[in-house]
Image (cartoon, grey):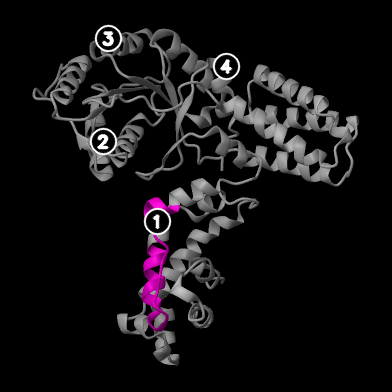
Amino acid sequence: MMFQVLSSRFQDLFRRLRGEGKLEERHITGGIRDLRRALLEADVNLRVVQVFLRNVKERAMGEKLTESWTPVRKLQAIVQDELVNLLSGKNMALKIPSSKGGVILLVGLQGAGKTATAAKLGRYICRQGRNAVTVCADTRRPAARQQLEKLSEKAGVRFFSPSRAGEGLHPKEICREAVAEARNGQGGVVILDTAGRLHVDSHLMAELKEIRDTVHPDEVLFVADAMTGQDVVRSSQAFQEEIGLSGVVLTKMDGDARGGAALSIVSVTGIPIKFIGTGEGKDDLDVFSPERMAARILGMGDLQGFLEKVESTIGGEPARVSNPDFDLEQVRRQLRKLRKAGPIQRLIEMLPGVNFPGDVSGSNDQLRETLAILDSMTPGERNRPDIMNGDRRRRVARGSGTRVETVNRFLKQFAQIRKFMRRMPGGKMPGTWKKALKTSTR
């Protein structure tokens, strides 16, 4: 996870300071020094680090932490506030006209993830109750059109095909036709996926300027690979000077980079981060929230993000079972829905107070193993778990590639859950998937 090292450093610092009891000035000075080292290790811009730490130190001294009964809690709140300030920008909300149409121009270097972002952004807009259409304005990269069309289909977003197909069609003409169709009531919000280069050059900028001046976009979003560090800041500055940007989309935020770009780009460029890409799935594009990101960096989790991610794939209604009919088929359905929410590790990282060094990555394997056990049962066995005798358990173990002991453990824990569930009013099923995951230990 991005920010994992930084988050670990911050949490270690506050844990150590809590052990000091009452803080003295030397503790605060040492803590500031540790924060500086952690931020520089995370590849945060040096000027940003200096301003951030100066603000933290001034507030810490001004609030007289050395005289407070809860100094560490107050220091943590100060750091959190300054992180929010660091990540916050003006006009962070996506600006789309309420009337027909609306144009979003995606720009950036090659390999940043513009095409995947175009499809995800289209899906996001559709889920907000608007229509969206993706447009491939990249006429140079082989199969760019086919890639965007396929990703758009998967995301459930309409893909625009120009009336005149063939060689030599200029990107600005494609964009002009798509926007005209949308403004005539045929489309919706138009998302333009433009060409990229390995580095900033005059030909790329000239093409983007022509498109911008032709369609007059409502948003110009710079799509940047967060794993490229400070290069993101430099390239965004170049695009800002030449094209003019209204926001940034940081992709690959689920990677293991240090995260310095996210903590630097707003302060250095003044351009707000509007979305972050958190994976390769069609729903892995999240609205950026400085408050929630700061909380995650400090190890406070993102409970709201966790609930939104699960509810968007599983559904907002809690799973309910009628007490007499609680069976393995219902467990199987809930686990299948949970798997759609994304890797278990990514979900667990959103929970407050949970900081796993990486061993939780095996949870996905455990989930698959549990589902394999359930899939190896017949519908009758899932509906009536009590009929699972020794022969049936051996057959399920062979079919799922597990051991009989694992199947026995799973069924034993299920029996305990069902016994507990039958005592619960309303038959709610909280935490069932967590217990099911624990049965798959080898």
- Direction front: furthest residue: 425
Secondary structure type for disc 2 = loop
For the residue marked with disc 1, what is the amino acid?
Gly
Asked if the residue at tag 1 contacts the one at tag 4, i.e. Cβ–Cβ closer than 8 Å, the answer is no
Query: Could you tell me if residue 407 is visible in this image?
Result: no
The part of the image, by quadrant, that contains residue 52 is top right
Magenta residue span: 310-336
Q: Tell me the residue at 48%/34% (across/down).
A: 288
Q: Nearer the viewer, residue 165 or 161?
A: 161
Q: Is residue 397 above or below residue 86?
A: below
Q: Earlier in the sequence, mark 2 or mark 1?
A: 2
Separation (CA) of disc 2 from disc 1? 21 Å
Circle on res. 316: 1
Asked if the residue at tag 2 contacts the one at tag 4, i.e. Cβ–Cβ closer than 8 Å, the answer is no
Separation (CA) of disc 4 from disc 1? 39 Å
The crowd level at tag 3 (other Cα within 10 Å; few <14, some 14-19, many 20+) is few
For the residue marked with disc 3, what is the amino acid?
Asp
Is residue 234 magenta-colored? Answer: no
- Could you tell me residue 189's position as x and y percent? 25, 28
Q: Tell me the residue at 26%/45% (across/down).
A: 154
Q: Which residue is mark 3?
A: 213
Asked if the residue at tag 3 contacts the one at tag 1, i.e. Cβ–Cβ closer than 8 Å, the answer is no
Circle on res. 289: none
Secondary structure type for disc 1 = loop
Secondary structure type for disc 3 = helix
Q: Earlier in the sequence, mark 1 or mark 3?
A: 3
Secondary structure type for disc 4 = helix
- Could you tell me residue 364's position as x and y percent? 48, 59
Q: Earlier in the sequence, mark 4 or mark 1?
A: 4
Q: Which residue is mark 2?
A: 130
Circle on res. 268: 4
Separation (CA) of disc 4 from disc 2? 33 Å
